[in-house]
């Protein structure tokens, strides 16, 4: 009878998420609340901006406002699912955007905000182990990319640096 070398038992499946390179619950909650505050600001900017002419600008702002409100609801739901408390704050982006009087300049600024959200999501997603949350964040990033493209088209390809 020949003895064969054996490997020690692997306990990787029992390792914590943070040990495996994933974000812990507190880090995720902090990131989700930061995104929630930004989305709330974006929704308000889009709502206030939707009253401006021309019609194609107004329609885009209405669509962006609906999307931002949808993502606020999703983020709130996910925060609560993780036993967190959703922030009630609105990001400083609101005041900065509304200080821009010209509608298309404001749209360019809003587009830079949308690109910031995409970058935040791209940084966060690889660190999220929760499949349901990951799917929601991916859908959010994809929709923000779509909105950036629509705004770029309206702006004639100028206005954001993603």
Image (cartoon, rainbow, N blue to C red):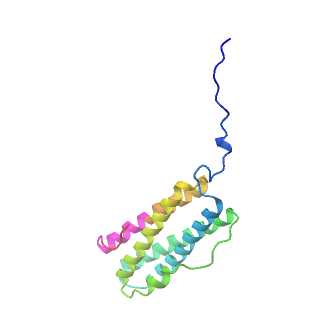
Which residue is at 65% across, 36% downward? Answer: 10
Q: Which residues are magenta?
A: 145-157
Residue 110 in percent (x, y) is at 42, 76
Q: Is 143 above or below relative to 101? A: above
Residue at horizontal 41%, vertical 64%?
146
The picture places residue 12, in percent across and down from the top left corner, at 64, 42
Residue at (64% x, 19% y) in the render: 4
Q: Where is residue 13, by image quadrant?
A: top right
Residue displayed at 53% across by 57% down: 125
Q: Residue furthest top?
A: 1
- In the image, farthest residue toward the right: 83
- Please state which of residues 10 and 94 is positioned toward the viewer in this rendering: 10
Decide if residue 77 is on the left or right side of residue 147: right
Residue 71 x, y percent position in the rendering: 55, 68
Check residue 95 for magenta coloring. no
On screen, 119 above or below 92?
Answer: above
In the image, farthest residue toward the left: 156
In the rendered image, the quadrant that contains the N terminus is top right
């Amino acid at each position: 009878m020949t003895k064969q070398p054996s490997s020690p038992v692997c306990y990787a499946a029992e390792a914590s998420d943070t040990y495996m390179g994933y974000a812990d619950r507190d880090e995720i909650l902090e990131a989700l609340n930061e995104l929630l505050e930004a989305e709330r600001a974006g929704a308000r900017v889009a709502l206030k901006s939707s009253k401006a002419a021309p019609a194609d600008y107004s329609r885009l702002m209405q669509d962006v406002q609906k999307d931002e409100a949808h993502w606020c609801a999703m983020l709130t739901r996910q925060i609560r699912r993780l036993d967190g408390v959703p922030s009630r704050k609105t990001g400083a982006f609101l005041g900065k955007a509304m200080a821009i009087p010209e509608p298309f300049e404001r749209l360019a600024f809003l587009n830079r905000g949308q690109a910031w959200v995409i970058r935040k999501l791209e940084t966060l997603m690889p660190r999220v182990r929760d499949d349901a949350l990951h799917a929601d964040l991916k859908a959010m990033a994809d929709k923000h990319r779509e909105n950036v493209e629509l705004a770029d088209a309206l702006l004639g390809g100028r206005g954001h640096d993603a």
